[in-house]
Image (cartoon, coloured by chain):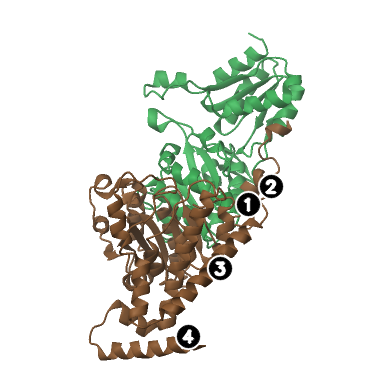
Chain colours: A brown, B green
Amino acid sequence: MQKQRGSTKAVTSATQSVRSSMTSTPFTRALEHLGADQLVEYYRQMMLIRRFEEKCQEMYTRSKIGGFLHLYVGEEATGVGAISNLQPQDHVFTHYRDHGHAIARGLDINPLMAELFGKDTGCSRGMGGSMHFADITKNFWGGYAIVGSHLLLADGVALQCQMQKTNGVVMVFFGDGATNGGEFYESLNFAQLWKLPVVFVCENNLFAMGTPLEVHSSVTEIHRKANAFDMKSMRIDGNDLLGVREQVGEAVAYARSGKGPVLVEAMTYRFRGHSAQDTQKYRTKEDVEKHRSADPLEAYRKLLVEEEICPASRLDAIDVQIDAEVDASVEFADNSPVPGNEWLTDAGIYAAPLETLTVDPTLV
Amino acid sequence: MAILTVREALQQALHEAMQDERVFIIGEDIGHYGSTYGVTAGFLEKYGPERIRDAPIAEAGILGLATGAAMAGMRPIAEIMSVNFSLLAFDIIINHAAKIYSMFGGKFSVPLVMRTTNGWTQLSATHSQSFDAMFAYIPGLKVVAPATPADMKGMFRAAMADPDPVIFIEHTLMYGIKGEVPDGDYVVPIGKSVLAREGRHITVVTYSRMVHLSLQAAELLAQEGIEVEVVDLRTLRPLDMSIALESFKKTNHAVVVTEDWQSYGTSAEIATRLYEAGFDYLDAPIQRVNFREVPMPYAKNLEMQVVVTTERIVAAIKKVLNRS
C-alpha cells in the first residue's frame, strides 16, 4: 500500500510538471492521456519479453528447446510501442522473431514456453515451435518463417476487415531483410491500390540475418521504398518506446480511417545473434556494446524513475514478479504432455480429413 | 438435367457460390477484360468490383491475399489464369496455404479455392505444362481435376464447402465439352473416383481431359472386341484408388494415362499404387501414356508428338494385352 500511495503521488507531481512546463513531448503526452499505471505497464511488458527471452536462451542451452531460436532482446520498444496502439478487433502478423510481439499482444507466456518445449499445451500445440506462435483468440495470426511472404497474408486479412467493415487494422512486422524480395513489393502495391488498413512495421535492425543493410539493399532508408507506391511512410526511432507508440499510433489511426496503408521504418538493434547459434562475425563487439549502452529498456526504466512516475523499488518488485512468472512458465512447459500421434495422420493435416486420404506405407 | 458445356457448368457453380456474401473472386483479367476463357464473363457487371477483383499480374499476391482473407473468414476464389503462372505463387501455396492448419496446431484453416487451367495449343515451352504432381505432392492441399461438366459443377460445390485449401484444375481444351448436368443443389464429394466406362479386358486409370481421350480409345477398341474399363480418379489428393483397384483385380491389366511428364509425375504414383496393392492380380507390366519429356515445342508437327493422343492410348492398351 505504501508503494501504491507513493506511485499516485508521483503521478500528481509529474502531471503538475507537465502543466508547468511548456515543452510537450511523447512522454508528457503519454502521461497525460494514459496515466502513470499504463506507462509502468509498458515497462512490465518490455521486461517480461527481456526475461522470457533470456530464459529461452538458457533453456536452449539446456536442450529443452530445439530448432532455431531468434531472440527479440534489444528490440522490445518497437514491438511493445507499436502493438500498444491496437484494439481487440485489430490483427497482428509477424516474422520468425515472434516472441516479443506475442507477449506484447497479451499472449500468456505459459503456452508460449510450452510451444518452445514442443508440448501439447503450446499455443500451436507443439506443431510450430519458436517461429510459429499464434493465438487466434487475440487475432495474433502467427510468426511466419519465410521472409516477406506473410505481408501478403496480412493484406488478405486487411481485405477481410475492409470488405466486412470490421473497423479492424492489420499490423505486420518484418525486418529490413524482407524488403528486397518481390512479395514485399506486391504487398505494398496491393495495399495502396485497394487502400487496405495495413500498418507495415519494418524493424530495421541493420542486418538481414548477417548481411549488413548497405550490402543487401540499394536504398538503405527503407521508408523511401513506399514512395514507389505513393504510400504514406515514416522513419522512427524504434528504441524510444513512447515515441514509437505515438508515431505508430498516427499510422494506425490513418489506416483505420480508410485512407490506406502506412510503412513505418523503426530503427532498432538486436543485442543477440540472428539465432542462438550465430557467431556474429559480421559486426564488432564494440558496435554491439555501443547499442547495449543505449538499451531501450534501461532508458525507459531510467525515464520512469527520474520523472518520478514510479520508484525504482516498485520496478524492482515488478522484475521479481516477472522472474517468478517466467520460472512458472518453464514449470508449466516441463509438466505438460507431448502432442499425440494423431498429428501424423490426415486428421492433423486437414480441417476436414477424408476417409480416402494418403495410404500409410507402413500399413500396406 | 440440362446439357451444358464445362464452361457453362462452371459458371453455374460460380454463380451459386457467389450467393454466399463471404465469397469473392480475385484474379487476372477476370472482370474488365471479360475473362480469358470466358468463365467469369459478365460477373463484374453482376456482382461489382468489390467481389470481382481484377488483380495486378502478381500471382503470389493473388494467392497471398486470398489465403489471408480465407484465414479471417472469407471464402475467396483465387483464379490463376494458367497453371504455368502458379509457379510464382508456390511459396504462398506450399509454405503457407498448405501448412497453416497443422503448423498452428489446428486452430484455424484456409478455406481457399484456387482455380487454374492446364492446356496447350502451340503455346510453346512455358505455357503448356502440367504441375498436377507438384500440387498433389503436398500434404495439406486437396487437389481435384474433374473431367465432365457435371463433375465440374458438383466438385466445385464441394471445394467451396471445404475448410481446407483446394486446387481446382481445369483444362483449356475442355471448356467446350458438353454433358448432362443435374440442376440445383448438386455436390460431388472430393476424394471419390468413379467408373467412366465398364469393360472386362483392361483398366485405364486416368483423370481430367485424358478421360475423354481414353473413352475415345475404348470406343475404337470395342470395334475390335477389346472391352476397356475407364476409371476417372477426379481427385489427385486425397487419391482414391478403390475403384481402380477393384477394376484391376477384375481385368488384371492396366494402362495409366496422364497429361504430364512421366518421370516423377502423377502416373508414377498411380502405377505404384496399383503395383503395391494389386501385385497378385498382375498379368502384364503396366504401361503409362504421358507427355514426351521435353519442354513443349512450338512447331505443330513436334507438339503433336509430345502430347497424348487417342492413337498412343490405343497402342499402349494393345501392348499390355499383347495384341497387334
Residue drawn at x 43%, y 39% is B87
**Which amino acid lies under the numbered mark 2 shown in the image of this protein?**
Glu
Q: Are marks 2 and 3 in contact (CB under 8 Å)?
A: no
Residue drawn at x 28%, y 53% is A286
Q: Outermost residue toward the top?
A: B324
Q: Which residue is mark 3?
A: A324
The answer for how far apart the CA atoms under marks 1 and 3 are is 38 Å
**Which amino acid lies under the numbered mark 4 shown in the image of this protein?**
Lys
In the depicted view, which residue is nearer to us: B272 or A309?
A309
| Numbered disc in front, either 4 or 1 | 4
Residue A97 lies in what quarter of the image? bottom left
Residue A351 image label: 1
The answer for how far apart the CA atoms under marks 4 and 2 are is 51 Å
Q: Earlier in the sequence, mark 2 or mark 3?
A: 3
Q: Secondary structure at mark 3?
A: helix
Position of residue B60 in the picture relative to residue A211 (left or right): right
Position of residue A271 in the picture relative to residue B137 (left or right): left
Q: Earlier in the sequence, mark 4 or mark 1?
A: 4
| Numbered disc in front, either 2 or 3 | 3
